[in-house]
Image (spheres, rainbow, N blue to C red):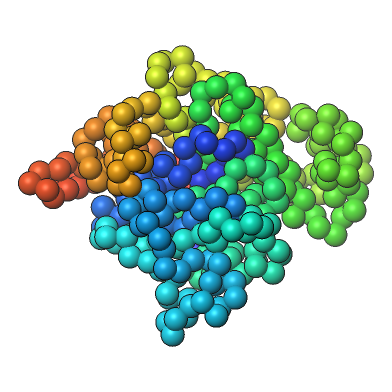
Amino acid sequence: MSTRNKIIAVGGGKGGVGKSIVCANMAVTLALTGQRVILVDGDFGASSLHALLGISSPKYGFREYFDHSGLDSNGEDALLLDTGIANLKFVSGAGDIPGSADINIKNQNKVISYIQSLEADHILMDLGPGTNFHIIDYFNIAGKNVVVSTPEMTSILKSFSFIKATLFRRISQEFKSNSDIQHLLDLSKNPKAAEECYEISSLRQKVEDLHPQKLERVNEIIREFKPGLVINRVRRQKDIMMGDNLLKLAKKYLDVDVTLLGYLIESDDVRDSIDEMRPFLIKDPQSKPSENIQRIIGSLTNTNIHLVKKDDSIYVSQQIKLSSGWGQ
């Protein structure tokens, strides 16, 4: 498996939708199957993933990595913190000091290089909210992309905007030297393009008019982008249907095939796990939220996973599906 395909990026356009809780329990699930997993806190503005793992004050994180002076003699290896969970290592973020979210391009490239150099079966990245380029660039280095949303319409629309920004960024990065295509995609400097290119058909037409030989590559990028969706805080069947609405929006306006990986129900088990600083999947792998996470991981890895806790030990049953997996 290539390094890119080992990376699972978890992002979304809106804060507070539960990306961290989903990402942390996904990582725990994979680790419990015996695979080597590294969980990376990529939220540089408000690092909090460590608290969900019961780590009150991480000794090292990206803040120390940026200046090197804070790391011990082990160098970069010091960033891989023990979690107390077999097979699971953790890399902490840059803390919550002022300006930590505004990392420069040099440090951004350092983070990307570091993540790509990690040796593990799976590397999960929990990203901050929004559509800043550095967040989207982290999202785009992954072979598997997961968008987390809640069922509210505001969150669904933010998730759509995140998917659109990610797609446009992929196309933009492919054609860095083409000023015409860059102008079409730079919505900050060309606000009119936000409306004109709202539908991918409009962008395709403009690319064909300007550079017809580039159109096929644009189409390839669109076809290759297949993000997965997780709906968090589901309380009723109607909430799940909101996920279907996002899938339809992405297909209609962007021609992007989004896969609904699963959902996570609203539950006291989830809220309690946050207060207790303990992943709910460790506390009770047979709870409903834990079953939800196992199905999501099953969709990601093309396996059927079943966890059972007995006598304070967790037992794992894992079967490979015969059908082709998502994102392959």
Give the percent coordinates (x, y) of residue 178: 87, 55
Toward which corner of the image does residue 112 lie, by quadrant?
Answer: bottom right
Give the percent coordinates (x, y) of residue 120: 39, 65
The residue located at (40%, 60%) in the rendering is: 57
Which of the two residues, 310 or 74, is positioned nearer the viewer here? Answer: 74
* Residue occupying the far bottom of the picture: 73
Answer yes or no: is residue 189 visible.
yes
Quarter of the image where the N terminus is located: bottom left
Toward which corner of the image does residue 250 lie, by quadrant?
Answer: top right
Q: Is residue 186 left or right of residue 124?
A: right
Which of the two residues, 53 or 147, is positioned nearer the viewer here? Answer: 53
Figure disc tally: 0
Give the percent coordinates (x, y) of residue 193: 86, 36
Is residue 217 depicted above or below 153 in this figure? Answer: below
The residue located at (51%, 23%) in the rendering is: 151
The residue located at (12%, 48%) in the rendering is: 312
Answer yes or no: is residue 9 visible.
no
* Residue occupying the far left of the picture: 311
Which of the two residues, 215 or 282, is positioned nearer the viewer here? Answer: 282
Give the percent coordinates (x, y) of residue 253: 71, 27
Is residue 247 depicted above or below 94 in this figure? Answer: above
The residue located at (47%, 34%) in the rendering is: 230
